Amino acid sequence: MSAKIIDGKSIARKIYEEIKPQIEVYCPTLAIIQIGDDPGSSVYRRSIEKRAYKLGVKTETFLLESDITEKAIIDLIQQLNRDKNINGLIVQRPLPSHIKENVVLDVMDPLKDIDGATSYNLGKLVKKEEGLFPSTPLGVIKILEESGFDLTGKDVTLIGRSVVV
């Protein structure tokens, strides 16, 4: 098999052009919660904010101190779950060591969990049911399909260090 160069930027542009009309009609708002000042998390958050802005997706960012209590985070997530103006929610990781990641993530409304990180959505993934799933694997599949790769009957393995990869 010969090597094939994949132009991810052109695929991304095509996807953005496809979804832009829906965004213009729907006007979604994404809430981003970052706890502490992890440099990698900050870079990723700014990337999300920048991409959202270009697409016309509003963002509400909550920058919280690393010594915040787990209860305060849970209270904020519950408030965002109830907020009809918030359509999606991301909790940036890593979380401080005193915060139980699974407890905090599972407070999220699974329908607002755009990372597919709640136990509910991960369970849907394992059971091969419809749900919201981590974007990295879905993105890889979309790129391969758009590039003409037939994945029928193929096993694909993605290796990463987090729930969303």
Image: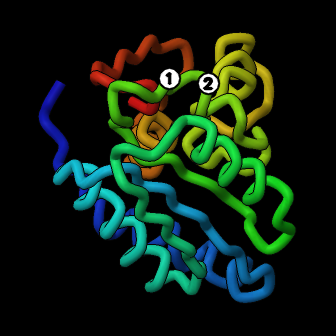
Q: Locate residue 55, reporting x and y percent.
A: 52, 81
Residue 6 shown left or right of residue 152 in the figure: left
Q: Amino acid at mark 2?
A: Val
Q: Which quadrant of the figure has residue 57? A: bottom right
Q: Locate residue 97, reporting x and y percent.
A: 33, 26
Q: Residues within 10 Å of mark 2 (few under 14, many from 20)?
A: few
Residue closer to the observer: 160 or 147 = 160
Callout 1 secondary element? loop
The quarter of the image holding the N terminus is top left
Q: Locate residue 7, reporting x and y percent.
A: 25, 60
Residue 70 seen? yes
Q: In this rendering, is residue 8 above or below 46?
A: above
Residue at the (44%, 11%) spot, across then down: 155
Q: Amino acid at mark 1?
A: Lys
Q: Mark 2 sits on what residue?
A: 103
Callout 2 secondary element? helix
Q: Residues within 10 Å of mark 1 (few under 14, many from 20)?
A: few
Q: In this rendering, is residue 26 above or below 135?
A: below
State how the image is colored.
rainbow
Farthest left residue? 3
Q: Which quadrant of the figure has residue 76? A: bottom right
Q: Mark 1 sits on what residue?
A: 100
Q: In this rendering, is residue 105 above or below 21?
A: above
Residue 148 seen? no
The quarter of the image holding the C terminus is top left
Residue at the (28%, 22%) spot, across then down: 161
Kindly indicate whether the residue at mark 2 contacts the one at mark 1 (C-beta within 8 angstroms): yes
Give the spatial CA distance, label 1 vs label 2: 5 Å
Q: Locate residue 51, reporting x and y percent.
A: 41, 74
Q: In this rendering, is residue 8 above or below 86?
A: above
Residue closer to the observer: 53 or 148 = 53
